[in-house]
Structures are given as C-alpha cells and as structure tokens.
Amino acid sequence: MTLFALGLSHTTAPLPVRERVVFHVEKLFDALGELTRGQRVAEAAILSTCNRTELYLSAGEPQTAAEWFAHYHSLQPDELRPYLYTLPQDQAVRHTFRVASGLDSMVFGEPQILGQMKEAVRTAEAAGTLGTVLHKLFQRTFAVAKEVRSTTQVGANSVSMAAAAVKLAARIFPSLREQKVLLIGAGEMIELAATHFAAQGPARITVANRTLERAHALAHRFAGHAVELRELSAHLQDHDIVVSCTASSLPILGKGLVERALRARKHRPMFMVDLAVPRDIEAEVAELDDVFLYTVDDLQAIVQGNLDARRSSLEQAEAIIETQVGQFMHWMQARASVPLIRQLREQGEVARQHELERALKHLQRGDDPKTVLEALSQGLTNKLLHAPTQALNESAAEERQALAALIERLYRSR
C-alpha cells in the first residue's frame, strides 16, 4: 500500500481512549524516528490533538503500523482495534483534505486544526520522515484548505447552540482572547460550549459543578480551573462570559447575586447564556443594564437561520475536495509509472549509443556521410519498433485487437 492514514478521533473513540494515545510534543520527534526505523514505513507524519491522533504514512503495511501505534502507548493491538480506522490511498487523501479544512472537527469549520497539522508537518520535516509522497500530500492539503476557507462560508455559520453563543459573545467583546469564561455544569452541552470557547483562546476558562471531580475532568481538557457550585458567588464577578446548563429544577443565578457581581465589576458588561430547561438564570437578570442575557429560544433563531447556509457551504467544500482528490490521485498514478518510464528511456539510450558508435566507426573509415546517417536512422527505427512489432506478431487472436488499438494510441498512427 503506497499511501494510507490510520488513527482514531472523537468520532470513533471516547475521551479516556484518546487520552491514552496522545503523542506529547517533547516525544514526537523520537516517535517518528522509531516508526520509520526497521522499514516499518518509508515516510511518516503524526497529528496528535485532544480530539484526534492520526498517522499519515507511505510505503508500509497498515497492520504493522497499527501494532506499533498500540505498543508505543503500552497497549495491546486488540485494545485499540475497535476504535481505529485505516484509510487507503484516495480515502486517506480525502480525509486529510477534510481534516485540514475543518470538516471533520468537533467544531465544524474551526481553523485551529490547520495550524496543528502544519506544526505536525514541520516536526516530521525536522525528524527527516517526510518524503516525496507526504510532502506533496501536505503541500496540496494546505492549498485545498485555503481554497475551501476562501471560497466557501465554512466556519462562518453557527449550527449549534454553543457555536451561536460564541458568535454572540464576539459581538459584545472586541476580542474573546481577553475575556474570562465561566461554564456552569459538566454535561454534553457545556462540554461543547467549552470546546467552542476554548477554540477562541480566552484568558481563562473556569468550570463550576456540584461534583468537583467532574468539573476537574472537564477543566483539565481545556487547561482551565474547577470550582464547586456552592463557591459560585465568590467567583462570578471575575468572569465576563457565563454559560450555564445544569439539570437544576430551580434557578442557580438570581437577580440579586448577579447585581452584586456587577457592582464588584464596576458595571463592566457581562455576557450570559442560559442553555438550561428549566432556566438556570432568573429571567429578571435580563433587566439589569450591564447584562446581555440569551436563552435557548434566542439562540435557536440564529441556529435555524444558519442551517441552510452551512449546508450550502459543506456541499461547496466537498465538491472542491473531491476535485482535488482526483488530481492528487492522478499525480500518484503518474508517479507509479516512473520506474517503467525510466526503464524505457534507458533502453532507448542503449540503442542510441549502439547505433551512434557504429555510425562513428563508419565515418572514421571514410564512408559516405549520407549513407551512414541513413543506416543510423534505420537502425534506430528498427530497434525502437522491434518490441511492439514482435508483441503484435506473437499475440493470440483474442488479444491482438486490443494490443493493436494500444499500439495505435501509443504511436498515434491514426
């Protein structure tokens, strides 16, 4: 198999599994060297993020690479097999293009993955494990990702409550990188919100939950802090953005609590999103001058309006990728013919040298130059046409027609 990718991601493996197969930055260089030693593979690059660990490989066997992957992380191959995917040739190319373009991300269209892939390629280059095939693949990948992002609206349209919340927050604050985010709860919705807000690189992320252990687990993924829910009143004033989604039957944040936090903040604005049903934040909080409060219903309108735009963008992006996959596979197929082309040229060169040497001997002997050149051209013609002529004469009746058509195409005789 010339080119393939294997790995796992948020679509195939839960977080506890993904955590066990992370390639840490300080060990990645050595891992690449180990992977390519002993002719396991000829070329290798490793992309390792919180949501995926993938190996992009050339000239090797998937089973051997998968076994190395498992053993490197002190796992048995059977432990990883249920979560691994192996993508050969055009499937690997298509997947690489989609990943770089943000189409395979947990946050659809997010741009961070492209930078992470570029860093993985730089590391592979430094380790000396990036050869002709992978170099060409990633060169084309980055061009495809740029085309997708510049000609479609991928990443511009929010299609989840969490993504819509980020878009709204960006309207309130000039830069989310300077803001502190408080997430209340630790369920799936808050996890998704954490993923979206973390992608913006905020100044701090804090997770508040009744169970501190669950808060720690979620905060750890995003280099954040964890607090217990009962400590909320002491921390609320320190945060610019608050997103809440718990299973509480009663509001967690009342108007009085938020008023006190605003006074401590000297009335700097606070952006609040209540994703819970029933509500976590009292409706009266929206009456406060320095609060921007949005509920599920507010966000739903934004999400619905962007669904059609995203669908159109996705179709455009997939069409771009499909075209580029075809072009890359054409390059791969042409590359596979290189040894045969080289052999044909070497044979032609041997014939040329032989006829040239014979012609020079005749000229040195004083033969007529016109006669010598005539013999030279006839000799070359006979040698170059000998193989196809012999193959045609020796072919059986059932293959002669196909062979004749091929010779006509090669020599453009019609």
Image (cartoon, rainbow, N blue to C red):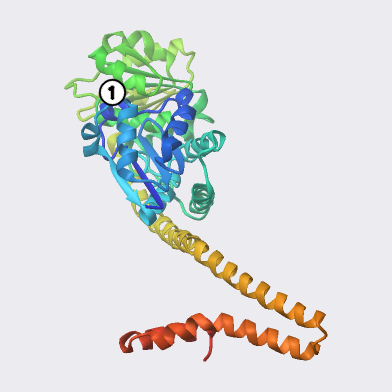
Height in image: 65 above or below 222? below
- Foreground: 341 or 170? 341
The type of residue carrying mark 1 is Ile
The answer to whether any part of residue 167 appears in the image is no
Please give the name of the residue rendered at 45% of the width and 45% of the height, measured from the top-left corner.
100
- Foreground: 274 or 94? 94
Q: Residue furthest left?
A: 249
Q: Which residue lies furthest to the front in this view?
A: 365
Q: Position of residue 130 (x, y in %)?
A: 52, 42
Q: Where is residue 154 in the image (x, y as percent from the top left)?
A: 44, 49
Height in image: 249 above or below 404? above
Height in image: 273 above or below 118? above
Q: Is mark 1 on a helix, strand or loop?
A: loop
Q: Name the residue under label 1.
A: 281
| Quarter of image, res 99 | top left
Q: Residues within 10 Å of mark 1 (few under 14, many from 20)?
A: many
The answer to whether any part of residue 41 appears in the image is yes
Relative to 345, 137 lies left or right: left
- Foreground: 325 or 331? 331
- Foreground: 277 or 77? 77
Q: Position of residue 134 (x, y in %)?
A: 49, 47
Please give the name of the residue rendered at 31% of the width and 26% of the height, measured from the top-left corner.
20
Relative to 302, 359 lies left or right: right
Q: Where is residue 311 in the image (x, y as percent from the top left)?
A: 35, 55
**Number of callouts:** 1
